[in-house]
Amino acid sequence: MLDKSPDSTAINVPNDLAALWMPFTANRAFKKAPRLLAGAKDMHYITVDGRKIIDAASGMWCSNAGHGRPQIAEAIAKQAAALDYAPPFQFGIPQAFELASRIAELAPKGLESVFFCNSGSEAADTALKIALAYHQISGQGSRTRLIGRVRGYHGVGFGGTSVGGIVNNRKLYGSLLAGVDHLPATYDREKQAFTKGEPEYGAHFADELENLVGLHGANTIAAVIVEPMAGSTGVLPAPKGYLKRLREITQKHGILLIFDEVITGYGRLGHAFAAERYGVLPDMITFAKGVTNGAAPMGGIIVRDTIHDAFMTGPEHAVELTHGYTYSAHPIACAAGLATLDIYRDEKLFERAKNLEPKFGDAVMSLKGLPNVLDIRTVGLTAGIDLAPRAADLVGKRGYDAMVSAFHENDLMLRIAGDTLALTPPLIISEDQIGEIVEKVGKVIRAVA
């Protein structure tokens, strides 16, 4: 338990860490040297011992508007006092309809219906279920196959794990869903290394979908799901023309295209959604994380009007889509989402990210040439830095050591994907703070050489 005695000047380390089984964490190593956080404000976390840690990760790709925003905290408190919970099945709250309308206004024209859930994982599984159901009600029930991509990440539900393509996330869980296939990854270091923005090389990777159509038959494929920028695998921007080519092929064969924008949504790439940046209209967009600035769990799917309208048939008293969650459109999450969208609009944070992108990319690229740096990729306010593994049997150890060094020795939070360092700072970052983060990352890279 935490020491909260009146004379305590800081929150102390809990005296027992054993009970909590932490997600996606090296539990034994963590509990030997915990990285415990007690507070956060703007660009910084505050540790339990009172240190300020500059956040180069937006928490976990979530806190695009920075931390401790009073508008969001006040909206949550006000909502909790007025209405703490309302059932989302057969009942509604005004805030849910308002938030859905505002999200639809931000989305590309044609994506007009919003279905709420509670996380990116739930959003991915929901989108996949909608795709399957849509084909069923459209008289194409043979379309049951789902296509993901190697190195893709779509959360941890059974659907998202199945279409995901990160080996370590899949290997413990058996065969997962049947009828799933994968496109190749879009990354080729030999031809794309040290790229700012979208690589010139790689649009042809989309053409593999034609081969999968030839293998399985177009009439068996329900949907393709991809991230416009594969984030959790280590920041892999889509090559120029790749997403447009994927859209052309899916439309040609009547296959739905789903963009997983859980990471890229809400300003990360300089637009409300990456679909706008790339001029591509998918059939569905999944979102989460930035919609509430990470202040409350929420996710969702934005669906093309043609898909939504296909369900609106039959008796009016009957449920059109037998899917949903107890906490869909939770009142507190809706309040947080509305306050967050106000901040994005009033402070023009999407535009700010777009304007800062060249400066951020140049700054991170200055790390080229440091020990063990194999590649650097930047797009929007996001960067991936590949470090060489320590040895074949120690893949990921250099990256892990870098994360530990960053936190304990350099007052820096960053994310890792194996031996890749990922930088995804809040959109409120200043040019001076970009320089500070890059300087600290340089020290970390040298420390783990």
Image: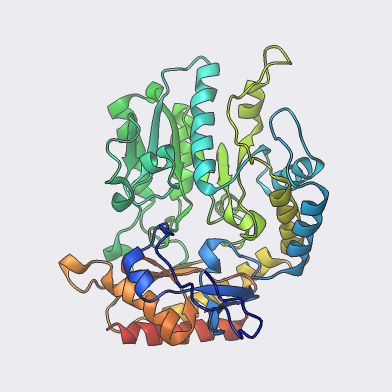
Q: In this rendering, would 345 be left or right of 257?
A: right
Residue 380 appears in the picture as rendered: no
Q: Nearer the viewer, residue 269 or 335?
A: 335
- Measured as percent of width and height from the top left, residue 369 is found at 32, 83
Q: Quadrant of the C terminus?
A: bottom left
Query: Which residue is depicted at the point 57% across and 84% down?
Result: 50
Q: Nearer the viewer, residue 24 or 293?
A: 24
Q: Position of residue 284 (x, y in %)?
A: 56, 39
Q: Is residue 116 above or below residue 189?
A: above
* Quadrant in which residue 349 is drawn: bottom right
Q: Residue furthest top?
A: 315
333 displayed left or right of 218 = right
Q: How many tags in the picture?
A: 0
252 left or right of 41? left
- Relative image position of residue 270 (x, y in whole percent): 61, 63
Which is nearer the eye, 376 or 144? 144
- The residue at the point 76 percent across, 35 percent down is 92
Q: Is residue 101 visible?
A: yes
Point out residue 67 in the picture as x, y percentages from the top left corner.
64, 70
| Quarter of the view holding residue 163 | top left
Q: Is residue 399 left or right of residue 408?
A: left
Q: How is the image coloured?
A: rainbow
The residue shown at (63%, 72%) is 355
